[in-house]
């Protein structure tokens, strides 16, 4: 739809209602509206937006370890807490790994019981996921959460301790959510606006599709749809096999870019191999000695035996490094130790056995080695010669 000059300002404000970035604004505009120079105007609007510039983030520099691409909605979901935020509340964030569909729930308090109740409400509305990925927070380690997963037949996977990048699917949305709070937190329905904008925005990681298109199988109707003639429909055709191949290729591409940029290398450890692992107890980090027990299946996490703390722990491969144990030197002269089974000898027997020292004349002299000596060829100057 080509927008006239008189309405372009209103369209730009509508596109920027939830303060998306330049890439997302252009993706939304590409599906609905056009006028010459719209791309430059979007860039100018975002660069001049105080809320967007004040909430801009620095690039991440941690190693990217991609998960296996899921085949369908709710095959794997990621959950995490965000907060306490600037409004004093903590939020439970829930993201589907296949469609990037997010859910946000305000929590107060954040006990294990309340966490289970919130997730139950999501399950009753949207269905039961096959797998839930979370960190090692006490709410997720509780008996209540374990019973919840067992009741609904959900596989619960923990990320490595103190390694938030392993839960990157939801950590990325945590960052988006917090920046949106800085920009729109003063509005009454800012959470609903943020969710609607995120769910209806095409994602590069989804091959240009939006979360609502993959999760619901259709496009949600928003205010920007009002620019289309009444009765016009936006088609939604998704080839799942083609989309799956794209996701796998996209993850490999992102992983390669991250590894090249940060100089990362693949590390492997064998069972029984001695290692050092990072210990985060007592508000400090230190390296402890341990031994590899096994690698967790389809994961960069290892189970390590740590004698210093008397139990096994799980650590990400980035939290481990090789340890070279010190080998004790074995004495070469083992005969110096007396054998208690051998009877002691008398001084006379010792004198008979001990070898006599050689006389000085039989010893080789410690002189300098002989060498051929040549006479020194000294320079004899001749005043009649100009050069030599």
Image (spheres, rainbow, N blue to C red):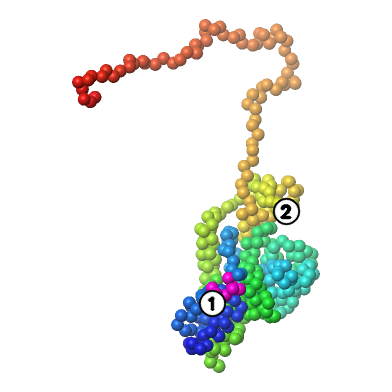
Secondary-structure class at tag 1 = helix
Label number found at residue 283: 2
- Residue 259 is situated, as x and y percent measured from the top left of the image, at 53, 58
Residue extent of the magenta highlight: 47-53
The residue drawn where x is 69% and y is 47% is: 288
Res 65 seen here: yes
- Residue 313 is situated, as x and y percent measured from the top left of the image, at 71, 53
Res 71 seen here: no
Secondary-structure class at tag 2 = loop
Q: Is residue 116 above or below residue 310?
A: below
- Residue 118 is situated, as x and y percent measured from the top left of the image, at 75, 74
Q: Is residue 233 above or below residue 164?
A: below
Front disc: 1 or 2: 1
Q: Main secondary structure of the magenta part?
A: helix
Q: Quadrant of residue 89?
A: bottom right
- Say whether marks 1 and 2 touch (CB < 8 Å): no
The residue drawn where x is 65% and y is 34% is: 328
Q: Which residue corresponds to mark 1?
A: 45
Q: Is residue 48 inside the magenta stretch? A: yes
Depth check: give the residue in front, 359 or 368.
368
């Amino acid at each position: 739809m080509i927008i006239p000059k008189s309405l372009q300002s209103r369209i730009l404000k509508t596109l920027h209602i939830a303060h998306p970035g330049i890439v997302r604004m252009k993706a939304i505009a590409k599906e609905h509206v056009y006028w010459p120079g719209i791309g430059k105007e979007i860039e100018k609007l975002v660069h001049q937006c105080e809320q967007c510039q004040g909430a801009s983030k620095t690039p991440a520099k941690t190693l990217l370890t991609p998960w296996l691409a899921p085949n369908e909605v709710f095959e794997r979901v990621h959950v995490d807490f965000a907060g306490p935020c600037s409004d004093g509340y903590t939020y439970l964030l829930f993201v589907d790994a296949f469609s990037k569909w997010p859910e946000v729930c305000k929590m107060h308090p954040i006990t294990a019981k309340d966490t289970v109740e919130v997730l139950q409400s999501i399950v009753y509305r949207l269905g039961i996921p096959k797998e839930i990925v979370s960190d090692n927070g006490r709410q997720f380690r509780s008996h209540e959460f374990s019973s919840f997963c067992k009741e609904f037949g959900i596989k619960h996977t923990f990320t490595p301790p103190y390694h938030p990048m392993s839960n990157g699917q939801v950590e990325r949305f945590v960052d988006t959510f917090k920046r949106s709070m800085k920009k729109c937190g003063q509005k009454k329905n800012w959470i609903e606006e943020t969710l609607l904008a995120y769910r209806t925005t095409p994602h590069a990681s989804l091959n240009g599709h939006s979360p609502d298109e993959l999760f619901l199988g259709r496009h949600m109707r928003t205010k920007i749809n009002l620019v289309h003639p009444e009765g016009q429909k936006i088609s939604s055709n998704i080839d799942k096999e083609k989309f799956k191949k794209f996701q796998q290729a996209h993850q490999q591409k992102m992983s390669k870019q991250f590894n090249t940029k940060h100089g990362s290398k693949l590390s492997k450890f064998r069972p029984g191999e001695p290692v050092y692992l990072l210990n985060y107890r007592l508000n400090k980090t230190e390296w402890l000695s341990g031994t590899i027990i096994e690698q967790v299946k389809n994961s960069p996490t290892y189970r390590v035996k740590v004698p210093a703390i008397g139990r096994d722990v799980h650590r990400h491969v980035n939290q481990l490094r090789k340890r070279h144990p010190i080998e004790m030197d074995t004495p070469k002269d083992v005969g110096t130790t007396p054998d208690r089974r051998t009877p002691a000898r008398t001084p006379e027997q010792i004198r008979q056995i001990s070898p006599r020292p050689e006389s000085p004349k039989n010893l080789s002299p410690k002189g300098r080695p002989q060498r051929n000596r040549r006479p020194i060829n000294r320079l004899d100057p001749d005043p009649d010669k100009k050069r030599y």
